[in-house]
Image: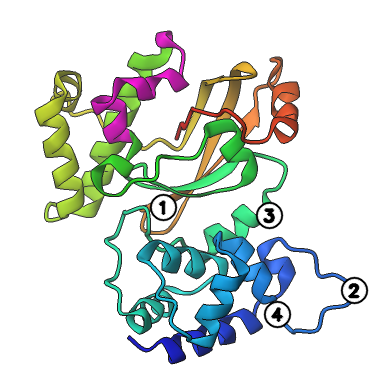
Amino acid sequence: MNLTELGAFLKSRRDRIRPATVGLPHGPRRRVPGLRRDEVAQLAGASVDYYIELERGSGAQPSEQMLAALARALRLSLDERDHLYHLAGRPLPRPGSAATHVHPGMLDLLSRLTTTPAQVITDLHVTLVQNPLAVALCGAPPATTGMRASLVYRWFAEPATRSMYPDADHAYHSRTFVADLRAAVARRGGDDQEANALVAELLRQSPEFTELWEEHHVAVRRSDRKRIVHPSLGVIEVNCLSLFTEDGRQRLLWFTPVVGTDSVEQLELLAVLGTQDLTVEPT
């Protein structure tokens, strides 16, 4: 652990970023070439005092979750992300976990999607980052690690998760989740422990998953039309579109209204309602 070098590294990465790159206004009277410390704290979900301590190397020891948030806020490359973890004396997060490094290109696109719900997930359906409208539409995922971070796991292991879609749509989503998961498992290779463990646990827990898995259907979920049950606005019908990274392990999802439905007005209301009383989390 080298907290002094950690602080210097954070400052160097902060100085190189233009506010517009991360969706912040430039402002007429900036005194620093890059981001201010309070802006990094805001982007990472930390207090300003805590972030100042980090840059000073004065004793604050960031958690793995905070390091992941800082890597995203500062648009670090994968090598830079790894360097940050090494300086903090923390183990690198497992691929596919909720602390997975988000592809910088995905983050850049996400920051530009300010008028439509959008989020980045893994190929195992772990939510990595959301914009405010996606939180308003989908809800924030549970603050958990391990297998339960995957929506596919919760869909089959925790029935209450299914309330985000109308009952009539559950069988359809079960089939598409399993077909998409089978494609992801094959793409990762037979020795991928995370994917294999997820499948093994679902085979143990869910007869429905087992039946669908044994059908061997494969279909990457590139686009979809969904009905999302929102606690305040009712059922919202949306198009869900996907953009994939080169290795297929991450995808940017964004939601658009379905023409001829009330979803145009409903999505406009999301910005007014904010994130109050939200319980759904579709991917």
Which residue is rendered at x = 45% and y = 38% of the image?
A: 222
The disc, 1 or 3, on the residue closer to the chain's N-terminal end is: 3
Q: Which residue is mark 4?
A: 34
Gap between marks 1 and 4, in whole Å? Answer: 28 Å
Judged by depth in the image, the label closer to the viewer, 2 or 1, is 2
Dot 1 amino acid type: Gln
Q: Which mark is residue 112?
A: 3
Q: Is residue 81 magenta?
A: no
Where 269 falls versus 201 (above or below)?
above
Where 56 falls versus 188 (above or below)?
below
The answer to the question of whether label 4 and label 2 lie on touching residues, with beta carbons closer than 8 A, is no
Where 120 falls versus 18 (above or below)?
above
Q: Position of residue 55 (x, y in %)?
A: 54, 83
The disc, 1 or 4, on the residue closer to the chain's N-terminal end is: 4
Q: Position of residue 239 (x, y in %)?
A: 58, 28
- What segment is highlighted magenta in the picture? 152-168
Q: Which mark is residue 250?
A: 1
Q: Position of residue 44 (x, y in %)?
A: 55, 63
Judged by depth in the image, the label closer to the viewer, 4 or 3, is 4
Gap between marks 2 and 1, in whole Å? Answer: 37 Å
Provide the secondary structure element on which disc 4 rests: loop
Which residue is rendered at x = 72% and y = 70% of the image?
A: 19
Dot 4 amino acid type: Gly
Q: What count of labels does the image hold?
A: 4
Q: Which residue is mark 2?
A: 28
Which residue is rendered at x = 41% and y = 79% of the image?
A: 84
Gap between marks 2 and 3, in whole Å? Answer: 21 Å
Which residue is rendered at x = 16% and y = 38% of the image?
A: 199
Report if residue 29 is visible in the image. yes
The disc, 4 or 2, on the residue closer to the chain's N-terminal end is: 2
